[in-house]
Amino acid sequence: MPIVLRSDFDATLLRKAARQSKNGAQARRLLALAVIYEGQSRTEAARIGGVTLQIIRDWVLKFNAAGPDGLIDKKAPGQPSRLTAVHRAALVEAVERGPDPAVQGVVRWRVIDLVHWLAEEFTVRVSKQTLSRELRKLGYRKLSARPKHHAQDPEAIEAFKKGGLPPSWIRSERASRAASR
């Protein structure tokens, strides 16, 4: 025996909700369910929705539980984070304190160094990408020093800043004469 659709909706309301929906998948699902409200078979609704009968049953269950909003695809939850609040707090403290060269063997933290530190301190294994994402969530950004050429001349830099160099674009005589006419 098929699962009965909720009684507070009808085909007209579902079609109206489908027209107003900005989500194409939700609109398709609403239109398929509207066919059922009109008295047609669930096989016909599956044909209209482009799915199987099992999927129609799943849509009916979602619709009965949450109404039209239940037919919107939600983001998959994914795996829970390996870092707890305690790990994050210790990570913030370690980043703010900086590394101890005698203990960690580095003079500044790199993401890979923090990955190793977490593995040693808490036996938590995370990838560089994951830790980088976590650090961004905590408000940190990867900064790198601007490179300086080994043969850079400080006097030439100051002369350039003061405008000591001639302009690289100068109007030609012919263009000047043509503009004055």
Image: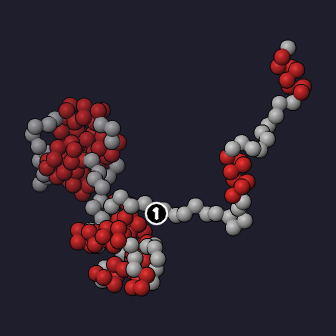
Q: Position of residue 80 (x, y in %)?
A: 26, 68
Residue pictured at 33% horizontal, 38% vertical: 22
Picture layout, residue 3 above or below residue 146: above
30 up-or-down from 3: above or below: above
Left or right for 176, reference 69:
right
Looking at the rendering, which quadrant does residue 150 occupy?
bottom right
Q: Position of residue 134 (x, y in %)?
A: 35, 65
Is 72 positioned to the left or the right of 5 in the image? Answer: right
Q: What is the number of callouts on the image?
A: 1
Residue at x 42%, y 68% (from the top left corner): 129
Which residue is more in the foreground, 7 or 151?
151
Residue designated by label 1: 142
What residue sits 39% from the left and 85% below the top? Answer: 103
**In front here: 161 or 111?**
161
Q: What element does badge 1 sit on? A: loop
Q: Quadrant of residue 167?
A: top right
Name the residue nearer the viewer: 82 or 62. Answer: 82
Question: Which of these two is toward me, 122 or 154?
Answer: 154
Is residue 169 visible from the viewing direction of this image? yes
Query: Type of residue at label 1?
Result: Lys
Q: Is residue 101 above or below residue 73?
A: below
Q: Residues within 10 Å of mark 1 (few under 14, many from 20)?
A: few
Residue 18 is situated, as x and y percent measured from the top left of the image, at: 28, 36
Q: Is residue 25 left or right of residue 9?
A: right
- Which quarter shows the C terminus? top right
